[in-house]
């Protein structure tokens, strides 16, 4: 079994991004990322903090808009319109989830698609489905980078994606389908999860449920990608896969932490550079 080391690869990518930022700055371009976080969810603030810190480390200019939980939709849309117009901002990210009184679709749809470094705008989601150039969501994009780094080609593999969210599962399905994997996508209403997972050469799980995938659900020699981030009773970070037992049976596996997690932020930096290079 080999570990897919997202920590090491993310460091390699961010070092490369830092070099690109330096080159862009020499041409008079400072890449900029604006992040919006609404409410006081500690996890969201922790993620936003990590994103801002990585911007600093790579030389990307960043601004964080922190908004109270009871902010109006109009105010959010106004701020997005301002960021769309700001020539110093190349990437815009709205941290999810948003409070329930805010229309998430309207907010994500208001972001200029050329600044949509999270790839959540319907325009970029559509381009991904059609296999066109555009921004793809950072977490599934990070998985693709990890597979590529370890010379794992999805072509012809029987793949199973567990979790069908707009942020992770659906774009993940499209990215590996575009690389010609044969894809099953499972979700809460799937009748027999094990029937799908146990035939997968490539099993990708992003649900948020500790020990959802146990060793009996995994094919011998499979490649396992664990996108889940959970805290167990001891307060330790764990994924959705029973790592201790599944790692005995598979060929490759991502650890939690240190697998897909750090790749998400690295890909955000990379998407921001791409947006800065493509600006008008
Ligand atoms: N919430 C959970 N994951 C993400 C992500 O990748 N991007 C944003 N914007 N919000 C999230």
Image (cartoon, grey):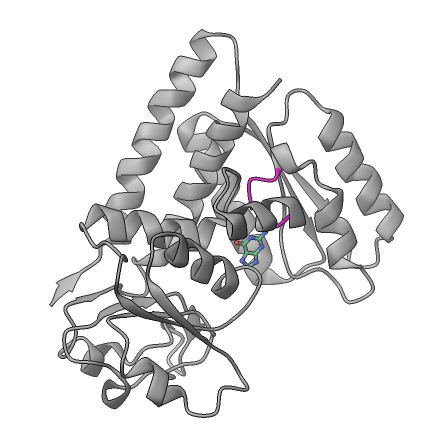
- Residue 63 visible in the current orientation: no
Q: Ligand 1 appears in which quadrant?
A: bottom right
Q: Quadrant of the N terminus?
A: bottom left
Q: Residue at horizontal 32%, vertical 61%?
A: 181
Image: magenta residue range: 116-121
Q: Quadrant of the C terminus?
A: top right
Callout count: 0
Q: Nearer the viewer, residue 211 or 131?
A: 131
Q: Residue at horizontal 63%, vertical 57%?
A: 96
Q: Position of residue 5 (x, y in %)?
A: 22, 54
Is residue 119 one of those drawn in magenta? Answer: yes
Is 120 placed above or below 232 here? above
Is residue 83 one of those drawn in magenta? Answer: no
* Quarter-of-image position of residue 12: top left
Q: Nearer the viewer, residue 42 or 33?
A: 33
- Residue 174 visible in the current orientation: yes
Left or right, 215 with respect to 277, comes to left
Q: Position of residue 203 (x, y in %)?
A: 31, 71
Q: Residue at horizontal 47%, vertical 46%?
A: 131
Q: Residue at horizontal 14%, vertical 68%?
A: 251
Q: Position of residue 68 (x, y in %)?
A: 78, 53
Is 3 placed above or below 84 here? below
Q: Nearer the viewer, residue 118 or 15?
A: 118
């Amino acid at each position: 079994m080999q570990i897919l080391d997202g920590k090491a690869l993310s460091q390699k990518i961010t070092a490369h991004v830092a070099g690109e930022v330096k080159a862009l700055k020499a041409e008079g371009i400072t890449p900029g990322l604006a992040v919006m976080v609404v409410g006081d969810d500690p996890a969201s603030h922790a993620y936003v903090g990590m994103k801002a810190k990585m911007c600093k480390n790579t030389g990307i200019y960043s601004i964080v808009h922190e908004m109270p939980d009871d902010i109006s939709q109009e105010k959010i849309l106004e701020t997005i319109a301002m960021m769309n117009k700001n020539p110093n901002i190349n990437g815009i990210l709205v941290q999810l989830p948003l409070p329930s009184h805010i229309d998430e679709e309207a907010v994500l749809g208001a972001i200029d698609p050329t600044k949509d470094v999270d790839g959540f705008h319907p325009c970029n989601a559509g381009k991904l489905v059609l296999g066109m150039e555009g921004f793809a969501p950072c977490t599934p994009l990070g998985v693709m980078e990890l597979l590529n780094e370890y010379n794992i080609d999805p072509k012809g593999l029987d793949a199973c994606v567990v979790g069908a969210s707009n942020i992770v599962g659906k774009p993940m399905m499209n990215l590996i389908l575009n690389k010609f994997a044969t894809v099953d996508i499972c979700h809460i209403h799937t009748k027999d999860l094990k029937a799908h997972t146990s035939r997968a050469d490539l099993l990708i799980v992003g649900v948020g449920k500790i020990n959802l995938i146990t060793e009996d659900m995994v094919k011998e020699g499979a490649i396992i990608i664990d996108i889940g981030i959970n805290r167990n009773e001891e307060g330790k970070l764990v994924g959705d896969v029973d790592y201790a037992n599944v790692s005995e049976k598979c060929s490759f596996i991502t650890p939690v932490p240190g697998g897909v997690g750090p790749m998400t932020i690295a890909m955000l930096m990379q998407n921001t550079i791409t947006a800065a290079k493509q600006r008008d």
